[in-house]
Image (tube, rainbow, N blue to C red):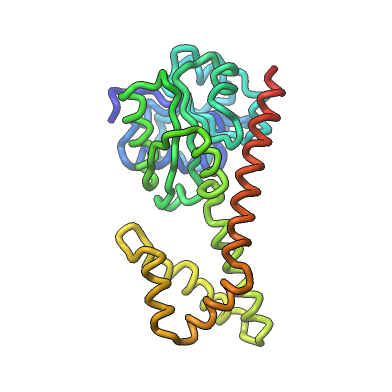
Amino acid sequence: MFSRLKVGIIGGGGWLGRAIGAALLDKGVVAPADLILSSRSGRVEGFDAWSEVQITADNRQLARQADVIVLSVRPEQFAAVSIEASDKLVISFMAGISLATLGEATGSRRVIRAMPNAAAQIGQCYTPWFAAPAVDAADKAFTQAMFEACGSADEVGREADLDYLSGLVGTGAAYPALLAEALLSHALARGLPRHIAENAVRGVVVGASQLLGRDGMPPAEMLKAMFDYRGTTAAGLQAMINGGFQQAVEAGLDAADEAARRMQARFARLRQ
């Protein structure tokens, strides 16, 4: 536990705010009495077991009380968030909102941008984060511990890296879901019963992909092994590659990166 730091999550009623808050409590990173959650309704579900957690609808009150302020709101809601955090650590989950814009809006020099995703709910979230120069070692240690409570995390060296990773990591299960939907559509078109097709797709996208986990086989090694076997998998992989699979993935990631840059420019203008 971090010296009784009070942590306030603006947007604590949303799925990501709730997931992060619950992980902090489950892992003992923050004591229940030191967690403050805000939502527009003043209600947050899922925290009945921790009666000491404070729930509020007043973001300014949260900012006054908290030592660490987490901004877990959608980027388009950012303009409506008005807080003063001149001596606080501010951690933002918003894509496309730069450190400079965050600093101007909150008055804080101790600002961190991070990109967690929906896998925080199951403790499998990978979170990249980037810190402003004024963020000290203690701030970084807390940030790393917060994200390790719901998965794993890395500090990245450039803000541009965080923008790129917003389109890669921030998607959570969306890219695997796109692959799963394509596989499912093909299986159904071949006449498979839906429950069998869905089980087969989950077995591939969710189950078998665990072989690529942190301690598993590197992707390139897995592909080489499948190609070397020269079986049905190799034939399927080669056809996908010939059909432009790599180019489609690259185009998607480039588009997501460009969207993050456009968002950053747009929100910077809105704050002027």
- In the rendering, at what x and y percent does residue 148 appear? 35, 42
Left or right, 100 with respect to 266, comes to left
Q: Is residue 205 visible?
A: yes
Name the side, left or right, on which 132 lies relative to 149.
right
The residue closer to the viewer here, 91 or 26, is: 91
Q: Is residue 26 above or below residue 51?
A: below
Residue at 45% from the left image edge and 47% from the top image edge: 120
Residue 225 percent location from the top left of the image: 37, 76
Q: Is residue 9 visible?
A: no
Q: Quadrant of residue 80?
A: top right
Above or below residue 226? Residue 180 is: above
Q: Which image quarter holds the C terminus?
A: top right
Q: At which x and y percent is residue 142?
A: 34, 30
**Residue 6: quarter of image:** top left
Quadrant assignment, res 74:
top right
Q: Residue at x 53, y 74 (%)?
A: 201
